[in-house]
Image (tube, helix red, strand yellow):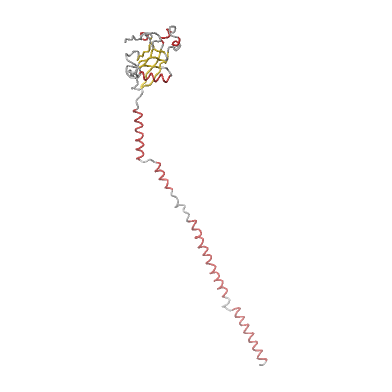
Amino acid sequence: MNKPIKTVLACLAAVAVLALAFWLAFGGEKPQQPQVEQTIQNETEIPPIMEEAAKEPDEKEPEVEIPETAAKPEPLTEPEDETQTPSADETVTADEQQGPAESETTTEPERSVCTISISCATLLDKLDTLPAAVSELVPADGWILAPVQEEFSDAESVLDILLRVAQREGIHLEYAGTAMGNSAYLEGIGNIYEFDAGELSGWMYSVNGEFPNYGCGQYFPQPGDVIKLVYTCDLGADVGDNYQG
């Protein structure tokens, strides 16, 4: 081949290379690829952001679902109030229970009161004639039991009251016969017996100043009665009564 032809071909090749380079450098197709890639990258970047935004409510859902308002069963206090407030039936039963108690207190029998005393004052003038063992038993004022008020029931006799008082006060008392009926007979009180001051001496009782002619176990006193146990040295003449057998 001739040298001039080679030179021409080389020039044409150089021109083609330059044209191709120019076309590649300033052409409209390849420069748009980076933009497309950027848009694609942008499009690929958007879904993660949207996914995060979508995930935020999902992560916050458990906090929103806290059953604060739903778990407020405050009306449960109503059953407690119902248990505290008594029902009508319970109120009726309570009244029925209180009724008998009040009736019992009102129906209890009232106990009566009497005055009782024991005296051997008639022996004060006879101390010199009494045995020493007897004179030592006579109180200085003559009262073995000063007047006291004593409660009693309707079923109690003078002897029942006397026995209770003597036992409570620690006073010796001895009687013959039975407590009920006319056979009860007082033999000794305060260790002072009948006949200690002579054949006509012994114990008698009076009620409101009167000497009943029957035993003290048969006499049932009335409210306010004054009962006196007295020692006589003359069959009652020295204490206000003339004894008649």
Give the quarter of the image for residue 218.
top left
Give the quarter of the image for residue 33.
bottom right
Residue closer to the observer: 40 or 231: 231
Quadrant in which the N terminus is drawn: bottom right
Furthest-bottom residue in this view = 2
Give the quarter of the image for residue 147.
top left
Tag count in the figure?
0
Residue 97 falls left or right of residue 128:
left
* Residue 50 percent coordinates (x, y): 51, 65
* Residue 182 percent coordinates (x, y): 32, 16
* Residue 228 percent coordinates (x, y): 37, 14
Residue 245 falls left or right of residue 128:
left
Residue closer to the observer: 100 or 211: 211
Furthest-front residue in this view = 177
Furthest-right residue in this view = 3
Quadrant in which the C terminus is drawn: top left
Residue closer to the observer: 53 or 79: 79
* Residue 86 percent coordinates (x, y): 38, 40
